[in-house]
Image (cartoon, rainbow, N blue to C red):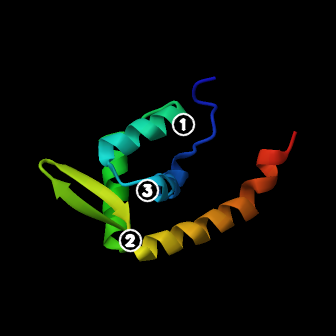
């Protein structure tokens, strides 16, 4: 059914906040986890601009460890994630439970 799927890329920032709510991660680790969940790994040109945007908005911070940057939620990011999750559940929750 290639080419006829719904484009779900708009959820990337939300997925990043969700993953970082569980534990700090580096970009490749997030990309692998998203691949596991979606079936498709986001390209570096997709995930790193999203990380940069979330960082510039003060929702995540990166700590460099050698060549790797490990990202974590900031206090504002934790609050933003809580609000995003409530919005997501309110908007899509009934779709998940629908049979």
Give whichever of 62, 3 is nearer the camera. Answer: 62
Count residues near mark 2 (Cα–Cα under 10 Å), then give few for <14, some for 14-19, many for 20+: some
Where residue 51 sits in the image (x, y, percent)? 34, 58
Q: Residue furthest left?
A: 66
Q: Which mark is residue 8?
A: none
85 lies left or right of 11 = right
Q: Quadrant of the N terminus?
A: top right
Q: CA distance from mark 2 to mark 3?
A: 10 Å
Residue 61's place in the image compared with 35, above or below, is below
Which residue: 37% across, 74% down?
Answer: 57
Say which element carries label 1: helix
- Given residues 22 and 17, the one toward you in this image is 22
Residue drawn at x 35%, y 61% as measured from the top left: 72
Mark 1 or mark 2, whichever is nearer to me? 2
Across and down, in percent, residue 12 comes to 48, 52
Answer with left or right where residue 64 lies relative to residue 61.
left
Q: Is residue 41 above or below residue 46?
A: above
Q: Kindly identify the residue that appears in the image at 51 percent across and 55 percent down.
A: 18
On screen, residue 63 above or below 15: below
Q: Could you say whether the residue bearing mark 3 is in a helix, strand or loop? A: helix
Q: Residues within 10 Å of mark 3 (few under 14, many from 20)?
A: many
Q: Residues within 10 Å of mark 1 (few under 14, many from 20)?
A: few
Mark closer to the observer (3, 1) = 3
Q: Residue 74's mark?
A: 2
Disc 1: which residue: 37
Q: Earlier in the sequence, mark 2 or mark 3?
A: 3
Closer to the N terminus: mark 1 or mark 2?
Answer: 1
Task: Where is residue 24? Give x, y as percent.
Answer: 36, 55
Q: Count of labels shown?
A: 3
Q: Quadrant of residue 29?
A: top left
């Amino acid at each position: 059914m290639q080419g006829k799927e719904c484009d779900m890329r708009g959820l990337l920032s939300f997925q990043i906040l969700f993953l970082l709510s569980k534990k700090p991660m580096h970009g490749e680790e997030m990309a692998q986890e998203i691949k596991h969940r979606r079936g498709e790994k986001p390209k570096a040109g997709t995930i790193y601009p999203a990380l940069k945007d979330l960082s510039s908005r003060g929702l995540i911070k990166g700590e460099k460890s050698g060549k790797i940057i490990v990202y974590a939620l900031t206090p504002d990011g934790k609050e933003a994630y809580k609000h995003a999750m409530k919005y997501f559940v309110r908007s899509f929750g009934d779709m998940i439970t629908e049979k």
